[in-house]
Amino acid sequence: MSNSTVAKRYAQALFKLAQQKNSITEVGADLSELTKVIKESPDFLTLLNAPKFSIDRKKQMVAEIFTGATPEVLHTVQLLVEKKRVDEMKLIAKTYAELAAQAQGTANATVFSTRALSAEESANISLAFAKLVGKQSLNITNEIDPSLLGGIRVQIGNHIYDSSVVNKLERLKRELIG
C-alpha cells in the first residue's frame, strides 16, 4: 500500500469519527498544531521512530506532549506510533483538512501576489473564485511573489487562474511573435 493510500485511509477514518463527535473544527485545529510541531521540530519524528524507546514509552510521551489535544487526535497519533507509521502524520493532516473543507463547502486556495493582501481583498477574491469552483468560500493563503510584477495568480487544487502582468506580457509576446 502506498503512503498516500495509507494516509488517506487514516484521514477518512479520523474525519468520520470527528463528524460523529461534532468535532471537525477542533480535530482540524489539533492536526494543524501537530503539523507545526513536526515542521518546527523535525527531531520529534526522529524520536518517535527511534528503536531505543518502547512503543508504550513513545505513546506515553505523545500523551504527555499533547495533553490538550482532542482524544481523537491523541489516539490517532498513538495508533500511528504503534503501527510504525508516524511519517504519515503530515499527509494525514493535509488530507483531513481537504476532507473537512469539502464537507464545509470550502476549498483551500493559494493567492500569489506582489504584496500582502488586505482582509477586504482576500474576502473579495474568496467570494469571486469560490463561485468558479462551486464552493461557498475559500480559505486563502497569501504568498508574496515579486516576479509577478502585478496582478494575482490563484491556485485552487489543480486549477490555476493567472491574471498576473507577467502572464499577460507572455501572452502578448506569443501573439506578436507567433
Image (spheres, rainbow, N blue to C red):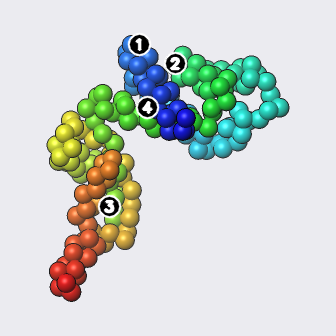
The structure residue drawn at horizontal position 68% and vertical position 37%, both measured from the top left corner, is 44
Q: Which residue, as the protein is rendered here, is positioned at the far front? A: 1
Q: Kindly report the distance in space between the C-alpha atoms of the residues bearing marks 2 and 4.
A: 13 Å
Marks 3 and 4: which is nearer the front?
Answer: 4
Q: Earlier in the sequence, mark 1 or mark 2?
A: 1
Disc 2, disc 4: CB below 8 Å?
A: no
Amino acid type at circle 3 is Ser
Q: Nearer the viewer, residue 146 or 155?
A: 155
Residue 11 can be seen in this image: yes
Amino acid type at circle 2 is Glu
Residue 127 can be seen in this image: no
Q: Which mark is residue 72?
A: 2
Quarter of the rendering occupied by the N terminus: top right
Q: Earlier in the sequence, mark 2 or mark 3?
A: 2
Secondary structure of the residue carrying tag 2 is helix
Tell whether 26 sits left or right of 62. left
Q: Which mark is residue 96?
A: 4
Tell whether 161 sits left or right of 141. left
Residue with the mark numbered 3:
113
Residue with the mark numbered 1:
21
Q: Earlier in the sequence, mark 2 or mark 4?
A: 2
Q: Kindly report the distance in space between the C-alpha atoms of the residues bearing marks 3 and 4.
A: 27 Å
Whole-percent x, y for residue 69 in the image? 55, 22
Disc 1, disc 2: CB below 8 Å?
A: yes
Q: Residues within 10 Å of mark 4 (few under 14, many from 20)?
A: many
Q: Kindly report the distance in space between the C-alpha atoms of the residues bearing marks 1 and 2.
A: 9 Å
Q: Which mark is residue 29?
A: none
Amino acid type at circle 4 is Tyr
Disc 3, disc 4: CB below 8 Å?
A: no
